[in-house]
Image: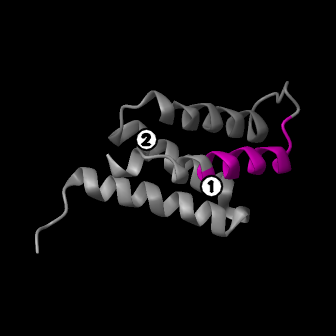
Amino acid sequence: MEEPTQDECSKYYFWYLLKQIIDNESIAINYAYEIYQVVREEFVSEELNVWYEISEMIDDYRYGDNVEGITRESLITTIVKEAEKQLNCNFLLN
């Protein structure tokens, strides 16, 4: 057996977080922040920049002036949809 590479570990952790969001929507907001950190530190991909946008939405909802009127439900829906989309794409296979 070989030790997994950093890239393999990051991809697996990314996949794990996405699965957790889908399996338990109540943790979606917290795990979305974690996904953003993984993406920021480990991946360079235009397709994954959406996690930055989601983290900004979370900040607006929690701490900002929330001009857009973001609700917890709409935020969770956005996060879950993106998690499903990411799981269905080929990113993890590259």
Does 77 lie within the magenta span?
yes
Residue 74: horizontal and vertical position, in percent? Answer: 83, 44
Density class for disc 1 (Cα within 10 Å; few <14, some 14-19, many ≥20) is few
Could you tell whether 89 is left or right of 92 in the image?
right
User: Residue at point 36% right, 38% down?
Assistant: 43
**Taking 71 as reference, is 44 above or below it?**
above
Mark 1 falls on what kind of element?
helix
Mark 2 falls on what kind of element?
helix
Instruction: Tell me how far mark 1 sits from mark 2, CA to CA.
Output: 15 Å
The label nearer to you, 1 versus 2, is: 2
Density class for disc 2 (Cα within 10 Å; few <14, some 14-19, many ≥20) is many
Does 16 lie within the magenta span?
no
User: Residue at point 70% right, 40% down?
Assistant: 58
**Taking 2 as reference, is 11 above or below it?**
above
The dot on residue 30 is 1
The front one of 4 and 59 is 4
The front one of 39 and 37 is 39
Q: Which segment did they paint magenta?
A: 70-84
Q: Amino acid at mark 2?
A: Val
User: Residue at point 27% right, 56% down?
Assistant: 8
Task: Please name the residue that numbered disc 2 is placed on.
Answer: 39
Residue 55: horizontal and vertical position, in percent? Answer: 61, 38
The front one of 30 and 93 is 93
Q: Amino acid at mark 1?
A: Asn
Q: Earlier in the sequence, mark 1 or mark 2?
A: 1
